Image (cartoon, rainbow, N blue to C red):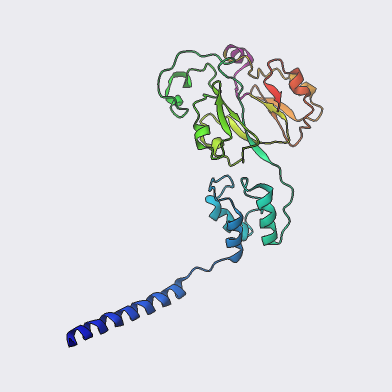
Amino acid sequence: MEGILVAAAVVGGLGILIGLFLGISAEKFKVPVNEKEVLIRAELPGNNCGGCGYAGCDGLAKAIANGEAPVNGCPVGGDAAAANIAKIMGAEVGDSVKLAAFVKCAGDCDKAKESFNYYGEKSCKVMPLVPSGGPKTCSYGCLGYGECKDVCDFGAIEIVNGIAKINQDKCKACGKCVAVCPRHLIELVPVTSPVRVQCNSNDKGVNVKKACSVGCIGCMLCTKQCEFDAIKVENNLATIDYSKCTGCGKCAEKCPTKAINLF
């Protein structure tokens, strides 16, 4: 009986010592918590999409709390989250422009030509290993196999008639589709700017015509219509400066191939 009591005393004593050690260690090595960071994190949606440029919502919350990121840095949370975070930080939200992803290609199955029939794996990532970069004659166009759709957490992308289509109302501008597209066809544009160039080809006009009926041929008619110097043709492709574009639509009206459209 005496042995049992001694053993119990030893075990109990060790338990107390271990408890004291853990308590002291926890107090000594604890990481200080920024209260603002905790409150900001609670306002973020938790998608951890990386669209803000940080490694998830925790990273953005820390950056905002430390003054390293703007209060409206979360594209998914939008204006509501920005307003709440601004109150926590005691700051102004400032002006923000809603962005949405845009696919720079209109070459669907009816408008874009194919050089051969392809029967292999249906994946955009595989196409660089395929002759000519895939069956489409245009080596710049959307392949339509849907990696962008697969990574979208908001159901904003559909594959329609061989090309990706984006629903601006659903898009949160997280940028995942932009990152996954192997042909860099997707970009984030202001939803308030309705004029878009639906082409990404740098080929000369004669070659564009052979590949797609709605491709930009670099004719420069659009630049002659714009009174605000908002559109230029570089490397045979029209590009729009959204900070200058007023959305008048004159360039779209004169585009002979309808590569420029109003949205």
Residue situated in front as seen by the camera: 153 or 148: 153
Considering only vertical position in the picture, is 83 above or below 177? below
Is residue 215 visible in the rendered image? The answer is: yes
* Residue 239 in picture, x, y percent from top left: 68, 28
Q: Is residue 29 above or below residue 110?
A: below
> Is residue 36 a member of the stretch shown in magenta?
no
Q: Hey, which quadrant is residue 244 in on the image?
A: top right
Residue at image location 76% in from the left, 18% down from the top: 254
Instruction: Tell me the quarter of the image containing the C terminus.
Output: top right
How many numbered marks, from 0 up?
Answer: 0
Q: Residue furthest front?
A: 1
Q: Is residue 245 above or below residue 73?
A: above
Start-end of magenta stretch: 199-210
Question: x%, y% of residue 227?
Answer: 82, 27
Q: Residue at x 55, y 46 (%)?
A: 50
Answer yes or no: is residue 140 visible.
no
Q: Quadrant of residue 168?
A: top right
Location of residue 68 in the rendering, given as x and y in whole percent from the top left corner:
62, 56
Identify which residue is drawn at 45% across, 14% down. Answer: 117
Indicate whether residue 205 is drawn in magenta: yes
Residue with the most extreme right position: 227
